[in-house]
Amino acid sequence: MIPGNFEYHAARGVDEALQLLSRYGEDGKLLAGGHSLLPMMKLRFAEPAHLIDLNPIEELRGVREDGDHLLIGTMTTESALQQSDLVARHCPVLPEVVALIADPQVRNRGTIGGDALLGDPGNDHPAVLMALEAEFVIRGPKGERREPANGFYLGPYLTRLADDELATAIRIPKCPPGQGYAYCKLKRKTGDYATAAACCLLSLAGGTVEKARLSLTNVGPTALRAEDAEDLLQGQTLDDGRIEQAAQAAMSICEPAEDLRGSPEYKTHIAGEMTRRALRLALQRARGQ
Ligand SMILES: Cc1cc2nc3c(=O)[nH]c(=O)nc-3n(C[C@H](O)[C@H](O)[C@H](O)COP(=O)(O)OP(=O)(O)OC[C@H]3O[C@@H](n4cnc5c(N)ncnc54)[C@H](O)[C@@H]3O)c2cc1C
């Protein structure tokens, strides 16, 4: 319950946050919604000597259009995502995901950036951003760069973000009208991390699958993109046999850790079931049903 002592810095802008990160190196930690970092500090799993608070930086909040992309500031809260008309119109899978994350109080503080950048395999945004082919807009001492969500996650709490960098926004291609989508998550109770979850995005052309994206949450050291399963779906008419093949392919890449949510075998089985459900729901929506 009692965190260690630390010095607090309210960053007034991105440049100031970057200067503070460079100054304090490994001793400095960015504070976003605080709902992963503070629990870890209260248990003394994390003991940063300096907290660099991003909350005063208004430019990091909000959703806007950028041509055929949505640009979501990393400090945008889960609640703000739920209330955004732009997100509902151009990326309808996101509100579905957010409604399954934590609880209303946590969603009022927790940010999409904190969730996606922490590298916790239990978090829900990473797999969804992989399926959406999103990119992180990253600022560091050498300037700005973009990093695709696919390939960003290297291991538990390990990403391609360097210690002296921060992400300012997440760039998501607008979802084409009529695209089917689904996020299916099994959890023990409201506010629990997934036993397993699957994200599916599906576009149809004349009854066959034009494009399929499938990804999985909490069944490996990182979020997983199920590319072999996607290949099995592309160009095909979806029937029960195809859906089963895709579910089996998704299960074959699972490497879940054993914990109180179940054994690796159980979690892999659940990942398959979540994949079947996500595919069926996305298919229904793509057919306008
Ligand atoms: C009871 C409870 C239930 C929860 N259930 C779920 C759940 O079901 N699904 C789920 O996905 N999450 C869940 N969470 C986690 C919650 O959504 C967290 O808020 C989220 O994981 C972290 O976001 P944050 O904004 O709170 O980040 P913080 O805790 O403030 O930050 C975490 C870390 O992210 C990094 N970071 C943050 N912002 C940036 C940035 N702009 N650039 C670079 N690095 C950055 C930093 O390293 C920072 O230390 C739960 C949390 C609680 C307390």
Image (tube, helix red, strand yellow):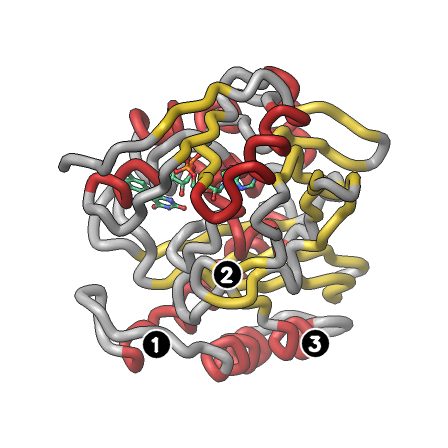
Q: Residue at x 41, y 32 (%)?
A: 51
Res 60 → quadrant: top right
Location of mark 2 (residue): 158
First of labels 3, 2 by sequence position: 2
First of labels 1, 3 by sequence position: 3
- Residue 90 lies left or right of residue 97; in this view the side is right
Res 231 → quadrant: bottom right
| Residue 126 percent coordinates (x, y) | 53, 53
Location of mark 1 (residue): 269
Does the numbered disc 1 mark a residue whose Cβ is under 8 Å from ligand 1?
A: no
Do the numbered discs 1 and 3 sit on residues whose CB atoms are within 8 Å? no
Q: Inspect the image, locate mark 3, and give the three-letter code of the amino acid beneath it.
A: Asp
Q: Inspect the image, locate mark 2, and give the three-letter code of the amino acid beneath it.
A: Leu
The number of discs equals 3
- Residue 261 lies left or right of residue 239; in this view the side is left
| Residue 264 percent coordinates (x, y) | 30, 79
Query: Which of these two is toward me, 102 or 18?
Result: 18
- Residue 6 lies left or right of residue 96; in this view the side is left
Identify the element where label 2 is drawn.
Answer: strand
Question: Dot 1, how many residues are within 10 Å of its Cα: few (below 14), some (14-19), or many (20+)?
Answer: some
Quadrant of ligand 1 in image: top left
Q: Residue furthest left?
A: 1
Q: Inspect the image, locate mark 1, and give the three-letter code of the amino acid beneath it.
A: His
Question: Dot 3, how many residues are within 10 Å of its Cα: few (below 14), some (14-19), or many (20+)?
Answer: some
Do the numbered discs 3 and 2 sit on residues whose CB atoms are within 8 Å? no
| Residue 122 percent coordinates (x, y) | 38, 56
Q: Which mark is residue 231?
A: 3
Q: Is residue 274 above or below residue 10?
A: below
Identify the element where label 1 is drawn.
Answer: helix
Q: Residue furthest right?
A: 67
